[in-house]
């Protein structure tokens, strides 16, 4: 009975209507992304009540949590793609070995990252050039707590990727809902010292976040113990052959490097923003969290596209690869237009929910309006990156992304030196996002054209 229940969680990505299969997998992932966004915005709303200085502390320290996602991408992307390919080829035992290898690699990377960031927290925060001693101290505390316990986030990210590759996206959604509820309860208790808890301020937000992530990990562990697709075959205490790590690294390394460079560029941009004062950092932090309504959802959909294309590519069902991508792009166009309209039409009421100082709100309104013009193109870019990854072609998309993301810094320096001031930095984000969206879409259509020439008979069925 338990086994049959487990199987209903896994969507058949190789057969049936493409839109139904794709959206059936994507909707829970997108819902999970929205839950994670609510998770971040809940933190920001409570921290905003402490003041813009606290927001700046969390924003700068949070950059290193973001940087850690580039490190875990090596295990997450390599594991997810190879599990999907193996399942598409009908090799469940091999898929289980890739899953075990991804988890083992994730644990190793988490320990290394925690040791480095905890021991070097103060000089790493010093990179941003913050001026307030209190903001700096709060940022160091927040970073040591969240990065020191990064293993829980790593396990959640890797297990989400593996389960998505099997066609199960609902488990991740349920686990993250539990984490959101825990975070909503814990944030005010630990930040403001309600009941038996001491008032911890920014450190309390970090403890609440880590505790919620730990709870999510527990939910994942309890869920995968009942899995009968691959996790019943996973042996974490057994050594994974080196060739599996090499295969995952070949696929995951370009994505990891891309994410790391993307974050490093954003950190440099944050340092540039700090030239307009610590309040500028607070505006960027809050604005990026609000903007996550589009990019986190697009990343969720991109993860679904990754697994859908990965399984069908492994099964040599090339017509479904093509149709799946085009269906995904059409869906993201609708979502991107909605997000653009939301940020452009309602920037004041939205930003005012998180920052309450009247002198800062106009700067936040400008941020949301300017970034609003790029949301459609950013959604297309992220979805296409997932499609390239599903084919195992992470290197070309990583190269393109690195080139145009790196261009943000010189463009921002040039534009901010004009009458635009700090708005020039926001326009640098928007201009490069528009360019990446157009180029990625064109590049993938060219890839499909080449595939059509190579596998004309299969694609002629479309």
Image (cartoon, rainbow, N blue to C red):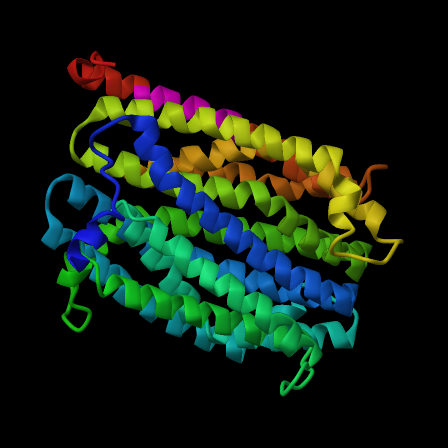
**Quadrant (top left/top right/bottom left/bottom right) for the N terminus:** bottom left
Report x, y in % for residue 100: 21, 62
Name the residue furthest top: 460
Whether 71 is drawn above or below 29: the answer is below
- In the picture provided, is 350 more to the left or to the right than 72? right
The answer to whether residue 5 is above or below residue 347 is below
Q: Quadrant of the C terminus?
A: top left
* Residue 389 place in picture, x, y as percent: 33, 39
Instruction: Determine the residue positioned at 23% across, 47% down.
Output: 8
Q: Is residue 440 magenta?
A: yes
* Residue placed most toward the observer, 315 or 176: 176
Is residue 303 or residue 141 the one in the foreground? Answer: 303
Residue 177 visible in image: yes
x 17%, y 73%: residue: 237
Residue 197 pos. (x, y %): 63, 85
In this rendered view, identify the residue nearer to me: 197 or 293: 197
Residue 97: name its quadrant: bottom left
Q: Where does the magenta region start and end?
A: 436-448
Q: Residue at x 42, y 32 (%)?
A: 384
């Amino acid at each position: 009975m338990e086994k049959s229940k487990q199987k209903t969680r896994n969507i058949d990505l190789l057969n049936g209507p493409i839109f139904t299969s794709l959206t059936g997998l994507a909707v829970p992932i997108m819902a999970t992304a929205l839950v994670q966004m609510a998770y971040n915005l809940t933190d920001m709303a409570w921290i905003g009540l402490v003041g813009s200085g606290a927001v700046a502390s969390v924003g700068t320290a949070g950059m290193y949590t973001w940087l850690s996602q580039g490190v875990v991408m090596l295990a997450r992307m390599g594991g997810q793609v190879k599990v999907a390919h193996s399942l598409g080829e009908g090799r469940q035992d091999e898929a289980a070995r890739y899953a075990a290898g991804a988890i083992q690699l994730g644990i190793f990377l988490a320990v290394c990252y925690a040791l480095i960031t905890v021991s070097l927290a103060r000089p790493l925060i010093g990179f941003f050039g913050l001026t307030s001693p209190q903001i700096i101290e709060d940022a160091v505390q927040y970073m040591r707590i969240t990065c020191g316990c990064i293993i829980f986030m790593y396990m959640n990210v890797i297990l989400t990727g593996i389960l998505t590759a099997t066609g199960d996206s609902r488990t991740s959604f349920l686990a993250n809902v539990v984490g959101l509820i825990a975070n909503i309860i814990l944030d005010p208790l630990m930040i403001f010292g309600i009941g038996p808890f001491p008032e911890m301020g920014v450190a309390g937000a970090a403890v609440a976040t880590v505790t919620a992530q730990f709870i999510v990990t527990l939910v994942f562990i309890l869920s995968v113990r009942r899995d009968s697709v691959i996790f019943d075959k996973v042996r974490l205490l057994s050594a994974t052959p080196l060739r599996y790590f090499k295969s995952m690294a070949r696929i995951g390394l370009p994505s990891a490097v891309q994410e790391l460079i993307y974050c490093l560029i954003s950190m440099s941009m944050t340092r540039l923003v700090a030239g307009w004062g610590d309040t500028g950092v607070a505006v960027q932090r809050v604005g990026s969290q609000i903007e996550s309504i589009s990019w986190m959802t697009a990343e969720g959909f991109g993860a679904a596209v990754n697994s859908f294309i990965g399984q069908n590519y492994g099964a040599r069902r090339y017509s479904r690869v093509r149709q799946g991508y085009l269906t995904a792009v059409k869906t993201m166009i609708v979502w991107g237009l909605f997000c653009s309209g939301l940020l452009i039409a309602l920037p004041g009421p939205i930003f005012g929910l998180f920052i309450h100082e009247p002198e800062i709100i106009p700067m936040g309104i400008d941020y949301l309006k300017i970034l609003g013009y790029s949301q459609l193109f950013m959604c297309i870019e992220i979805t296409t990156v997932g499609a390239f990854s599903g084919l195992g072609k992470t290197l070309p998309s990583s190269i393109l992304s690195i080139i145009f993301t790196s261009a943000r810094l010189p463009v921002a320096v040039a534009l901010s030196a004009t009458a635009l001031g700090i708005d020039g930095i926001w326009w640098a984000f928007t201009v490069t996002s528009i360019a990446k969206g157009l180029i990625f879409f064109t590049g993938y259509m060219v890839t499909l054209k080449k595939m059509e020439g190579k596998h004309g008979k299969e694609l002629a069925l479309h």
